[in-house]
Amino acid sequence: MDGELWAGRGRFSHAQSTVRQQQPEDAAWREMRFMVFDLPAHGGTFDQRLPALNKLVEALDHAWVQAVPQQRVASDAALQKLLLRTVRAGGEGLMLHRGASMYRAGRSDDLIKVKTHEDTEARVVAHLPGQGRHAGRLGALVVEMPSGQRFRLGAGLTDAERDHPPPVGSWVTYRFRGTHDSGVPRFASFVRVREDMPPVR
């Protein structure tokens, strides 16, 4: 079965910290689910694999193993409505799978991600102090893109993240919608720390 561990929408940091613990914490793992989205060894098309996947998950009868819900859309308008509902519910976007495709590892023209925004990573190079309501804690991160350009990233940070900000040298993911003429992202918003990417000192 091909799938991924999931702790719920908006709980990526919980999933990440749970799997990285040297001593597994039973309560944390009980909040996790293995979400199955394909059967690599089946040999048929995706349309043929999907019923087999659902039947297998049902036969396993484990609450922590679940099939990812799949549905067809009839038009681009229907797709956009589904995408909007998904994002409003806390999802990042949709994965579109061609029904006639054979299984192939990784992304391809048969499996694409659709989102309402772009996202990428940048390295934290400094912390800026907050003002007003955020006085005494982080106001914004100064981050550096792979191109070397730097910008302030303050939107999207929770109070807890402002109290304990990502350390200098760590990598963070941020969302944005296009770029300014200078190349700096427009409407950039912090998403999470990339703990799977080694910090740069």
Image (cartoon, rainbow, N blue to C red):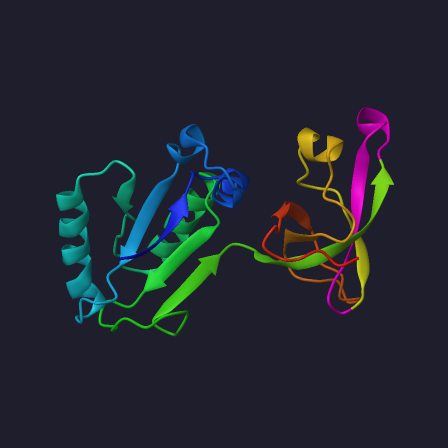
| Percent position of residue 96, x then y | 35, 62
Q: Is residue 51 left or right of residue 108?
A: left
Q: Which residues are magenta?
A: 130-147
x and y, in percent, of residue 198 in the image: 66, 57
Question: For the point 45% across and 37% down, which residue is it?
Answer: 24
Task: Mark yes or no: residue 73 visible.
Answer: no
Locate the N terminus and report the quarter of the image it occupies.
Answer: bottom left
143 inside magenta stretch: yes
Badge count: 0
Identify the residue shown where x is 38% and y is 74%.
109
Q: Nearer the viewer, residue 166 or 19?
A: 19
Looking at the image, residue 169 sits to the left or right of residue 106; the answer is: right
Q: Nearer the viewer, residue 75 or 162?
A: 162
Picture quadrant where residue 107 is located = bottom left
Residue ranking furthest to the front? 23
Q: Can residue 172 be seen at all in this image of the molecule? A: yes
- x then y, percent, for residue 4: 38, 52
Q: Nearer the viewer, residue 58 or 149?
A: 58
Q: Which of the 4 image quarters holds residue 118?
A: bottom right
Q: Give the residue drawn at x 80%, y 57%.
A: 201
**Residue furthest out toward the top:** 133
Please tell me which residue is depicted at 85% across the width and 42% down the height of the picture. Answer: 128
| Horizontal relation, residue 122 to residue 125: left or right | left
Above or below for 120 versus 191: below
